[in-house]
Amino acid sequence: MTAKNKKGAEVRQVRFSERRDAWLRHHQTLAVDSLVEMLRRPISSMLTWMVIAIALSLPALMYLFLLNVQHVVGPIESGAQLTLYLDGAKVGQSGQKLAEDLQQRPEIAATEFVSAAQGLQQFREYSGLDDVIDSLGENPLPDVIVVKPVDTTAGSVESLKIMLEGLPEVSDVQLDLIWVQRINHISALAETLVGFLSVLFSMAVLLVVGNTIRLAIESRRAEILVVKLVGGTNAFVRRPFLYMGFWFGLAGGLVAWGLIALCFYLLSEPAAELLASVGSSGELVQLGFGGVFLLLVTAILISLLGTVIAVGRHIRAIEPS
Amino acid sequence: MIEFDKVTKRYKGGHEAVTDLTFSMAKGEMAFLTGHSGAGKSTLLKLLANIDRPTSGQVRVAGQLLNRMSSHQIPFYRRQLGIVFQNHHLLMDKTVFDNVALPLVIEGERPRDIARRVHAALDKVGLLDKEHERPMVLSGGEQQRVGIARAVVTKPRLLLADEPTGNLDPLLSREIMNLFADFNRVGTTVLIASHDLGLIARMPFRVMTLKGGQMIRTDRTVPYDR
Ligand SMILES: Nc1ncnc2c1ncn2[C@@H]1O[C@H](COP(=O)(O)OP(=O)(O)O)[C@@H](O)[C@H]1O
Ligand SMILES: [Mg+2]
């Protein structure tokens, strides 16, 4: 390389880094300007933030509600149990022994033997139907063993049930799981519903931001024409609006966070009482750091997408004539 | 610098604004484009700025064929021009400085360079003391000079002006025309549309006369003493 060439390369290098600095500064200016622009019209900006915030906080709250229901139901679910009705003729007096044998099995966490007499006594206590029971003369109840499985997932409980039904001393097995399954079904249904609503609400955000940006573009139509007349590219014209979309998304996300926090504040006391009444020791599942981050990122991305769509459609259409 | 080859521009509805126009301008030349209202002066300038495209024929500027230019290339082509518009096209909510700086910001110049060049351009048009004002509070002549400063701040090779003295008094008009002549003296090619015949006649530049979209005269006036 000759000295002259080297000098040229250096000059280009300097020129390039200067350009990059200018470009960065241009973006900084744009970011600040578009923020100021948004804040200069607080009323109309706030309307947009609120719409974004409501549309995002509703599905977020529904999702959190679901999480909490599952959180409360979860511990109860582990109480899934099987009731074995024993055949009195075959078992005789060895029901207690059978219960102890069953407890040795690895898939069974605990067993409890309830003799027919104990069962009748329990029934008497909580029904209060002493007269009726006395008139029966003979105890109609069978001996019962309550079995708590180790693994409470539906499949393994089901196979445990089949095994227990095969025991000769057992006349019938009842799975006390049906309502847990129902809750699981309902919560799966609710999850799908929340997912669907989230998509709908996201589209609402897209449309609202798109419309806000469209209005902003219209109101600066004259300026855009001038910029294009003196050689501004579409990308140059787009840039401030993209920043505006970013700020709208961030502001909307922050307001949504505020709404969710407010909701949790209002619900904290009744929720604590409810949790205590169902015997759950846990606390409410909150949005958390990750949740807030996800909420803000989602808000910004959806808002930017709405902006990109609006900007792509409307800026190209503005051409000097 | 400018070559028109059998250029016709027909607007929607079939009206021909310019018809079979052929002329050229040399690099560094200055010329006036004149003719009655509706003669096609603005249309010709719009063809040069690639705001409109010819219906037929070819327009070349500095060797570039404008007909074929993609919409992606047009902004970069326009950066080579300085255009002074009849109605200024200034940004009314920005300062004079920001208005003049716009083409430089678009090109991504450094703030320090931008300030230096904007000040030089404003100094040239005599508005250095008005840089922080908004165009709204300026007189018509001052607004026009802001437009000129913005057109020349990038040191374009070709300067186009559409009725730059449209509604200014004779003295101011004369000053502005002299300003254009100054830019021409340092090598800029200048084309000015104007129907101010009295003013044009006293300047030593070529005059092209349009009528009904056709070039009916192109000649030079006698050089004069300024
Ligand atoms: N966008 C347009 N659509 C239709 N006709 C137009 C348009 N622009 C100009 N014209 C017509 O073209 C002719 C030339 O107009 P113009 O170039 O503006 O003339 P000048 O600038 O010399 O007054 C006029 O008859 C005008 O009505
Ligand atoms: Mg005109």
Image (cartoon, rainbow, N blue to C red):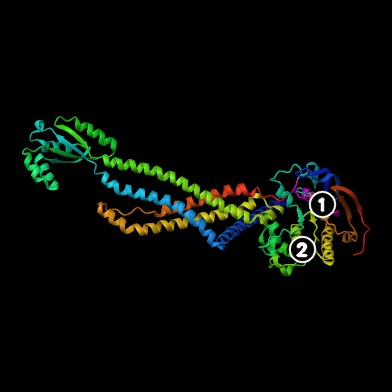
Badge 2: few (under 14), some or many (20 or more) residues near its Cα, within 10 Å? many
Q: Amino acid at mark 2?
A: Arg
Residue depth check, mark 2 versus mark 1: number of the one nearer the observer: 1
Q: Give coordinates of residue A244: x percent, y percent.
A: 56, 55
Image mark for residue B117: none
Secondary structure at badge 2 equals helix
Q: Chain of mark 2?
A: B
Query: Amino acid type of disc 1?
Result: Gly
The CB of the residue at mark 1 lies under 8 Å from ligand 1: yes
Q: Is residue A89 above or below residue B35?
A: above
Name the residue at 49% across, 52% down.
A299
Q: Residue at x 80, y 64 (%)?
A: B168
Q: Which residue is mark 2?
A: B145
Find the residue positioned furthest to the left: A137
3D distance between C-alphas at marks 2 and 1: 25 Å
Residue to which mark 1 is pinned: B38
Q: Around disc 1, counting alpha carbons within 10 Å, would you say few (fewer than 14), some (14 to 19), or many (20 or more)?
A: some
What residue appears at the point 9 percent right and 45 percent down from the top-left corner? A130
Compare marks 2 and 1 and give the one earlier in the sequence: 1
Residue B89 falls in image quadrant: bottom right
Res A88 visible: yes
Give the structural element (helix, strand or loop) at label 1.
loop
Question: Residue B63, can we see it?
Answer: no
Magenta-colored stretch includes residue A245: no
Front residue of B190/B54: it is B54
On screen, B226 above or below A182? below
Question: In the image, which residues are magenta?
Answer: B28-52
Residue lying farthest bottom? B129
Which percent across, then down, holds residue B108?
67, 55
Was residue B35 drawn as part of the magenta stretch in this picture? yes
